[in-house]
Image: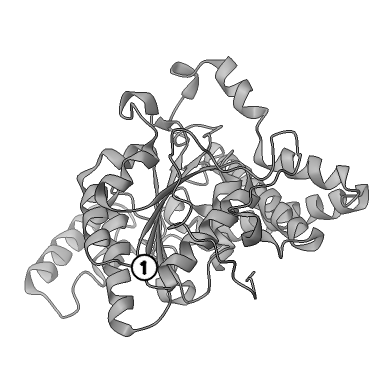
């Protein structure tokens, strides 16, 4: 989606005091509100486009629930659910152009879906059949980064490369609230500000860094940190797909026009566990989860569409059937994946033959042959 007539207002002009102002265009009850600073950035989102965003969120939630089920059934080794964060990922992911480049953590399945990642590609790594899910240059999205915060430096370096190329593309780094305490994120902010790099720092504040609440590391809203580095920031309701799209589009326009980096804090909530190896009931109050469930990103769009007469029972049925077909296709493809040759772990470690690696490969090959059928 693009805006033909770009509004005059940019983040430079509407720098927000993060503690006092969170951008919202759609309330948890599904009521459309107005914000003169950001309305124009989603002026092209009519009923058809909003239905498309709604369907995206329904589909990616269904993908997420199917992946969780696959892990519980032993088909995946691990899975990091995105339940509750659909608006942050779809709203920002659909704001990007094809020539923009994404650097994400391990939870941005919705962004990968927007970029065109194959359904099975989303799960290959988690089944353990490959070391990466897709070719980054096929969809302009790096494979997920597990080292917390490292992708912010990658995104900044790529953005400086964009400057050297003389294009108006941008890069975007996705990370969680916990990553903001890592040195990599702070170093990336320094470099991005120094070189006015066209990069977006997109922090999904889902309230928990694994089992630790965000308040333990952030005594003030996270978005307030970025201006200290010289990076404008904005705090947005991360469960509001329209508001997320608006602030992301505004930040992208700033980057494309030479204005430099922007920090976005999308305030959302991780409804599920950190990963399927986690038990959030050990550290979260059920009342807190219920409070956030009332702010569900899909429910609010559904309520708005229904109130406007834009979501019929036929629409709901068709969207759910589509989501179920996608999940079934993904399940079938993942279960059919074959285990790789054990010795393939040594492939592509170095660009050229390496004697040390060849020796290790030979040792491992002889070790495998000590098992029945190991030579296969």
The answer to whether residue 18 shows anywhere in this view is yes
- Residue 85, percent from left and from top: 56, 42
Q: Could you tell me if residue 212 is visible in this image? A: no
In the image: residue 206, left or right of residue 368:
right
* Applied colour scheme: one colour
State the image coordinates of residue 173 (x, y, percent, origin top left): 38, 57
Where, quadrant-wise, is the C terminus in this rendering?
bottom left
Question: Residue 278 occupies which quadrant of the picture?
Answer: top left
Q: Is residue 48 left or right of residue 28?
A: right
Q: Quadrant of the N terminus?
A: bottom right
Q: Does residue 354 appear left or right of residue 275 in this picture? A: left
Percent position of residue 249, x then y = 54, 62
Residue 119 x %, y %: 58, 61
Q: Would you name the residue on which mark 1 appears?
A: 198
How many badges with numbers are in the image?
1
Helix, strand or loop for disc 1: loop
> Farthest left residue?
356
Residue drawn at point x = 34 percent, y = 54 percent:
145
Q: Is residue 267 above or below residue 349?
A: above
Residue furthest out toward the bottom: 166
Question: Residue at left 30%, top 49%?
Answer: 149
Identify which residue, 253 or 97, lies in the foreground.
Answer: 253
Closer to the camera in the image, 118 or 236:
236
- Name the one closer to the observer, 200 or 68: 200
Compare residues 180 and 227 and report the one nearer the observer: 227
Residue at the spot 74% in from the left edge and 51% down from the top edge: 324
Residue at the spot 53% in from the left edge and 39% down from the top edge: 22
Local crowd size for mark 1, using a 10 Å CA cut-off: few (<14), some (14–19), many (≥20): many
């Amino acid at each position: 989606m693009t805006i033909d007539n770009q509004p005059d207002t940019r983040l430079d002009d509407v720098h927000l005091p993060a503690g006092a102002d969170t951008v919202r265009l759609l309330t948890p009850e599904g009521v459309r509100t107005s914000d003169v600073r950001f309305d124009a950035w989603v002026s092209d989102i009519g009923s058809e486009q909003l239905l498309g965003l709604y369907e995206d969120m329904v589909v990616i939630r269904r993908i997420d629930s199917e992946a969780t089920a696959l892990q519980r059934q032993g088909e995946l080794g691990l899975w990091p659910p995105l339940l509750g964060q659909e608006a942050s990922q779809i709203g920002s992911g659909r704001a990007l152009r094809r020539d923009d480049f994404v650097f994400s953590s391990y939870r941005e399945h919705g962004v990968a879906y927007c970029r065109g990642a194959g359904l099975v590609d989303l799960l290959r790594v988690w089944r353990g059949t490959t070391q990466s899910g897709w070719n980054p240059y096929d969809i302009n999205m790096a494979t997920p980064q597990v080292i917390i915060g490292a992708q912010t430096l990658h995104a900044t370096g790529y953005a400086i490369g964009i400057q050297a190329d003389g294009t108006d593309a941008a890069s975007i780094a996705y990370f969680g609230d916990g990553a903001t305490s890592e040195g990599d994120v702070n170093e990336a902010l320094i470099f991005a500000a120094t070189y006015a790099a066209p990069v977006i720092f997109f922090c999904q504040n889902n309230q928990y860094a694994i089992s630790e609440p965000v308040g333990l590391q952030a005594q003030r809203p996270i978005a307030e940190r970025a201006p200290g580095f010289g990076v404008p920031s904005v705090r947005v309701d991360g469960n509001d797909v329209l508001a997320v799209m608006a602030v992301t589009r505004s930040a992208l326009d700033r980057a494309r026009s030479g204005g430099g980096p922007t920090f976005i804090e999308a305030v959302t909530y991780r409804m599920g566990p950190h990963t399927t190896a986690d038990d959030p009931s050990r550290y979260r109050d059920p009342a807190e989860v219920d409070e956030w469930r009332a702010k569900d990103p899909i429910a609010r769009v559904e309520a708005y569409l229904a109130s406007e007469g834009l979501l019929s029972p036929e629409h709901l049925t068709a969207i759910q059937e589509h989501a179920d077909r996608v999940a079934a296709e993904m399940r079938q493809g993942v279960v059919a994946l074959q285990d790789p040759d054990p010795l393939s772990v040594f492939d592509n470690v170095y660009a050229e033959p390496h004697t040390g690696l060849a020796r290790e490969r030979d040792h491992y090959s002889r070790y495998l042959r000590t098992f029945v059928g190991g030579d296969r």
